Amino acid sequence: MAAETQAKPAETQPTAAPAMQASTQAIVTFKIYRHEPTVEKTPHFQTYPVETRPGLTVLDALIHLLDTQDGSLAVRYSCRHAVCGSCAMDINGKNMLACQTQVARLGPEVTLRPLTGLPVVRDLVCDMTNFFRKYNLITPYLVNKTKDEKDLTREWLQSPRDRKKIDHEIGCIMCGCCEGACPVLWTDENYLGPSAIAKAWRFIADTRDEGIQERIGILDSQYGVWRCHTAFGCVEACPKNIPLTESIEKARRRIIRYRLRGK
Amino acid sequence: MYTHQILVVGGGLAGCRAAVAAADLGANVAILSRVHPVRSHSGAAQGGINGALGTADPKDSPEAHTYFTIKGSDFLADQDAVQTMCQEAPSRIIEMEHWGAPFSRMEDGRIAQRPFGGAGFPRTCFSADKTGHVLMHTLFEQCLKRQVQVYEERHILSLVVDQDPKNPAARRARGVIALHMTEGKLESYRADAVIMATGGAGRIYRKTTNAHVNTGIGMALAYWKGAPLEDMEFVQFHPTGLFGTNILISEGARAEGGYLKNKDGERFMKRYAEKFMELAPRDIVARAIATEINEGRGYPGGYVHLDLTHVGRERIEERLPGIRDLSINFAGVDPVEAPIPIQPSHHYTMGGIACDINGTTPLPGLYACGETACVSVHGANRLGGNSLLETVVFGARAGAAAAQYAKANPTEANGKIFDAETQAAEKKIRGLGQGEATEDYAAIKTEMGNTMDDQVQVFRNEKDLRRALDKIRELKGRFPGVRLRRKGLRYNLDLIHILELEAMLDLAEVITLGALARTESRGSHSRTDHPTRDDTHWLKHTLATHTPQGPKLDYKPVTITQWKPEARVY
């Protein structure tokens, strides 16, 4: 992987921010990680005063800063309602979506860093290449071997009970909050990680899928399910409340069954 | 220089479906996208996708789907295109199911369907309230399966158009110049055909359900190179945007039994659509809510209530879990216990790049599909659940047509035009970095959004539209005074926002000019000074062509097959 990993930011003097107009609204201080690894050797924090109002999200504040105070900020965002998965970042020490986090709940100081453990493109934007590379390894599509895919006259049946088995995992928005919260990944970026394993489980548990053979190799490898230490960092971080550790546990049980029965 | 047979610009549902179709015909296809495909705004679609599968009601049929879509369009949709879409709908939906889309199911295991506005039958297939999200993932997975090359986080700077080597008198789309956002460099992409699938232009408005990336850039890129834009004045306002943030609250909420109530607690829809009530088409419901607010029966600030409290916790948790999360997280309201504050919000661009049912545009080599395109299947008002359908039906058709065209018309490598376009882009970026700014990008954007929100809105009139047009032209005049605040190109949002603003100003002008010219009320275009539909003069599509002096408006007839325009009563 080309990009550098995050360096420890120097706690140096933050650049002075333009004064805000006096207001009865509370002012919160945003401390933002700034770094362009290909240009600067070390990162630094820059502080900005942000006027809060009820309902203001961290992303709203960042867009406001971008528009009015500092056009040089880099932050990835799009939908602003927790479905596109772009704006995952470390907010006061926890991985969250900036768009889903109310400033009012964070206290007088808000410290923003890119997701822990991922390489940085610039400022709050992480390089997600490795995250998506691993997702690609789990044969990330429905595998069908026995049914006629070209017959479009009727759907393949699935009971509501069976459909419910994948209800959690299909909600994954691939934001990477879990990836940055997994202690195993901090030591080995090649570990598949909670998101890719949950995606694999989403297919394995789908009654229409026949791809266990394609997926078992990687899941049962040294980078697969056995590396999970059940630290639950991923579960705590997931903004979609997916019980990722449980998905990993289910995948483990399925692999043992596969080993015993050979299918 | 990257070379592919087909370039798909945009990695949302329409773009991915086009890529899959082209790849299945053996074409070498690549997707360029402003965001990673799974982050596309297609994923934000909630309520569902229409197709007459007849699972919920066996009396439903593609013919019924066609009729209600045409009626919903206020008879502006091209009827042959609607017939194509509705006939192909069941196959495309079942195909998505076979590819793994996890639709919600009936007890017998078939795909479940819910009733949607103006549909006549329960015809909307869904996956709880995350339909767009699961379809987006499924189609991206199919792209991966076919090893479609994806160039993500590319902002497109220009559509490259050259003389056709076979026919020097004709012009032809040849590729694009892109900005690689994370590496901060310009790139050339050459192809035999280009498919534009960049979604809608919602961010021209401030009160919109759309994502920040929905700037209509693909429409502008095509428009600047001579492709006409069709019916841009038809802008959909979704009845139920969350008050304060305008985040989408799905029509599914009303499909599952939600009521609209004014501040007196009255279910006011009975005064506007006695039979269909909350499930009338979106233009009618949006006007009803706007009227309630305008006449003082809304809540202070301008909203009414979407009440789900009687629907029950269990059904809300099963069918509308996302709506519940959004309401709690963004409005502090749990819909199980209290009504959701909502207001009409800009939602969808019915117009777009003029094209036929195969995505073919008047510019050879350029295809369009999805919200970027105007086929036209939505006419003056789109029915809920038809946009996801449009992406898969016409995405597939555009992908196949582009692949056939590319195969029949391979181009010789012509570096010169790409060099010239790259130099032009570099010059433009350099110019934005030189000298002092006399104008503020954010101020222009805010003024544009406020103008569109206030004067090119649910209800329109000549005075407002003239003021809006003047304002937009004033803003266009001020735009050259904007300068970059950051020079480096790596993830330079300042640069991208400025370029997107330039596109949005031109599109805002097209929308407003088209709205001013159309002296009738049809579908989403409601003129208080011309309150009735005028089929004698206005049963026709608007075509806007770019000229240095501004948009030039022409008109073309609507294709009517068997459904004669009739009064629209619900």
Image: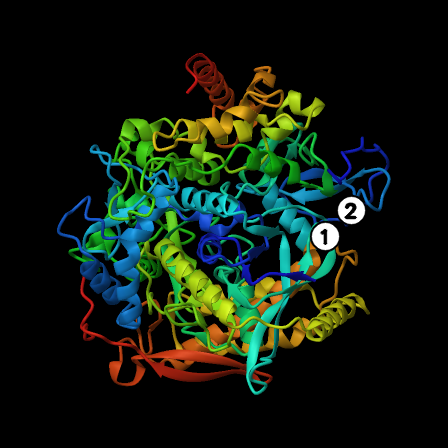
Residue at image mark 1: A69
Quarter holding the C terminus of chain A is top left
Which quadrant of the view contains residue A109?
A: top right
- What quarter of the picture does the N terminus of chain A occupy? top right
Determine which residue is flagged by label 2.
A17
Q: Is residue A79 visible?
A: no
Task: Please tell me if label 2 and label 1 are on a single chain.
Answer: yes
Q: What percent of the width, then of the height, locates residue A231?
A: 59, 16
The residue drawn where x is 72% and y is 69% is B422
Residue B293: x, y in percent? 34, 57
Q: How many C-alpha atoms fall within 10 Å of the one at disc 2: few (<14), some, or many (≥20)?
A: few
Labelled pair 2, 1 in contact (Cβ < 8 Å): yes
- Foreground residue, A135 or B216? A135
Q: Three-letter amino acid code at disc 1?
A: Gln
Question: As drawn, is B438 to the left or to the right of B225?
Answer: right
Query: Disc count in the image?
Result: 2
Q: Chain of mark 2?
A: A
Which mark, by number, is residue B224? none
